[in-house]
Amino acid sequence: MQFQDFANLIRLLAGQGKTSFQQFQPHSDTYFATLVNTDPGRNHVVLVAGGSMGGNDEFAICVALGIKLPKGQELNAEMGMDLLRRNAGLGIGSWCIKDYEGDTWVALRDVFTLKDVDPTWACARIQSLANTADAFESELGRDEY
């Protein structure tokens, strides 16, 4: 599967409104955002960027924003240790710090090579990222993204 095929699939699913993918917002030919339903009454945005390692080996970088850090505030050591412990127990991706639209976020990031996966698996992966990031956000009593 190529990145454009993957983006078109998410666009189609979001347009149908019959799946957990509810919105598709293209930013460029190699970057889009999708709104994914998670728990009842909640949803989460996942950012997806495509890239290439040369030849036909395209990959997707998926980022589910978790919580926004207050302006000018660094991640404290206690929260950093908590995120490292959480990484050890994750089934997918890893927690990271992501700058997005002028804000700094704790985010869940995952990368996979598109030629190695089928469309169902890739969609399930985005759903899992959204669910995990949203559960983290909910656990902290937040609902930001």
Image (cartoon, rainbow, N blue to C red):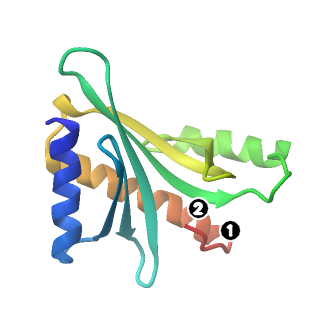
Amino acid on which disc 1 is placed: Leu
**Residue sitting at x 28%, y 71%:** 20
Circle 1 SS class: loop
Amino acid on which disc 2 is placed: Phe
Residue 5, quarter of the rendered image: top left
Q: Position of residue 15 (x, y in %)?
A: 19, 71
Query: How far, Cα to Cα, is label 1 from label 2?
Result: 6 Å
Please tell me how crowded label 1 is: few (under 14), some (14-19), or many (20+) other residues with Cα within 10 Å. Answer: few
> From the viewer's perspective, is 35 left or right of 14?
right
- Whether the residues at callouts 1 and 2 have beta carbons within 8 Å, the answer is yes
Task: Give the residue number, with chain letter if any, for mark 2.
Answer: 136
Which residue ends up furthest to the bottom in the rendered image?
41
Please tell me how crowded label 2 is: few (under 14), some (14-19), or many (20+) other residues with Cα within 10 Å. Answer: some
Q: Position of residue 85 (x, y in %)?
A: 65, 42
Q: Position of residue 133 (x, y in %)?
A: 52, 58
Q: Is residue 10 above or below residue 14?
A: above
> From the viewer's perspective, is 99 left or right of 119?
right
Q: Is residue 142 above or below residue 124?
A: below
**Residue sitting at x 80%, y 46%:** 75
